[in-house]
Amino acid sequence: MRVLLVGVGGVGEAIATLAKSRKWMELMVLADYNTKRAEEIQKKLGDTNRFPVEFIDASKQESIEALAKKYNVDLIMNSVDPIFNKQIFDAAFNAGVMYMDMAMALSELHPTDPYNKTGIKLGDYQFEKAKQWEEKGLLALVGFGVEPGMADVFAKYAADYLFDEIDEIGVRDGNNITIEGYKFAPTFSIWTTIEECLNPPVIYEKDKGWFTTQPFSEPEIFDFPEGIGKVEVVNVEHEEVLLVPRWIKNAKRVTFKYGLGDEFMDVLKTLNKLGLDNKEKIKVKGVEVAPRDVVAACLPDPAYLGDKMKGKTCAGTWVTGTKSGVKREVYLYQVADNEICMNTWGCQAVVAQTAFTPLIAMDLIEHGIWKGVGVLGPEAFEPKVFMDKMAEYGFPYGMREV
């Protein structure tokens, strides 16, 4: 397979690192606005032929198409902030190649009632073009990270193999990670974190469809496995809630809750109050700049935090319902230990855990196990073959039955 990797930040680096040992990966172009960063990753990989470096401006669709054609790629892997999704998605279509992302096209608030009604939902832009992709015989895989991605595979597995009737599919994410030397240091892109945490969370209920609620609503204590323990989780806007009901029709309710912590939520609320979460550019002493970009520039790059991080992160899917008339409650999960991730791949746990799903998906597509056309989420594919490969890639799953 020949891949154009757009973005080699923390997750992009992890994708390339995991791809290095896969012989079926013929070529992976390390394309980034910051070519010094891309060259740094290339040097770590030690293979200039399989991992060439290119400059790319992800805001310019024509430059993405040009690189795809230059290297005759099979797939464009979107590994940048989702603000660039539309042009990368459309570039893949125009270039006639497959597309994959880890976060779908951004949502837009309902104009009059944003905390009760959905406006433009996550992924709407992409799903509205599904018929065009089908007619062209092309495949776009959307939401193929860890959450969304692996969590959606778990949901499909539960629906196909573990349950007859489903009351709720709830993605639950928590960790006990600490970062030495920083008062505030997100382990993932702050740009994306602000977007998903301050937008109105979406909930799905079969009798109501999709609706929104207040940020950080419905707190609950969830007991995470492998020593992480009890963590308070809250509603956050996330793609799984938009993806799961499209393919799993018997789920009565779908939610996503994330363990953010009081301090983290207070910081995000303060950014919102001050308007520092704004992604639109404003003039500051004659210079145009987006406040959110300023916040990102003030914080440490998550890609370089690995040696200061300690602990584990857990991503998983909690499902309740019945099997053969008997009530059942299951949590399917994956726990990544930062020390193991750093020692094995040289990447911190959060980005490493996010990166393995797209690699497994590419593997299954390259070997003809997963097939399809159109715009498809993880639930559109057979889940067991994915889960069988997780341990091979260093990220085995677990299952806890309550």
Image (tube, rainbow, N blue to C red):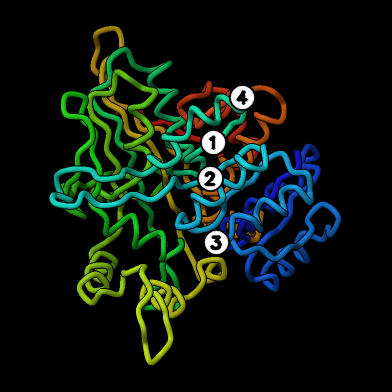
Q: Residues within 10 Å of mark 1 (few under 14, many from 20)?
A: many
- Residue type at numbered disc 4: Trp
Badge number at residue 98: none
Which of the 4 image quadrants contains residue 290? bottom left
Q: Nearer the viewer, residue 165 or 114?
A: 114
Q: Residues within 10 Å of mark 2 (few under 14, many from 20)?
A: many
Q: Residue at x 30, y 58 (%)?
A: 260
Horizontal side of residue 339 vs 261, given as left or right: right
Residue occupied by mark 1:
141
Residue occupied by mark 3:
59
- Residue type at numbered disc 2: Asp
- Residue type at numbered disc 3: Ser
N-term mark: 3 or 4: 3
N-term mark: 3 or 2: 3
Element assignment for label 2: strand
Label 2 close to label 1 by CB (< 8 Å): yes
For the residues labelled 1 and 4, the Cα–Cα distance comes to 11 Å
N-term mark: 4 or 2: 2
Badge number at residue 370: 4
For the residues labelled 3 and 2, the Cα–Cα distance comes to 16 Å
For the residues labelled 4 and 2, the Cα–Cα distance comes to 16 Å
Horizontal side of residue 193 vs 77, given as left or right: left
For the residues labelled 2 and 1, the Cα–Cα distance comes to 7 Å
N-term mark: 2 or 1: 2
For the residues labelled 3 and 4, the Cα–Cα distance comes to 30 Å
Label 3 close to label 2 by CB (< 8 Å): no
N-term mark: 1 or 4: 1
Residue occupied by mark 2:
101
Q: Position of residue 89 (x, y in %)?
A: 54, 45
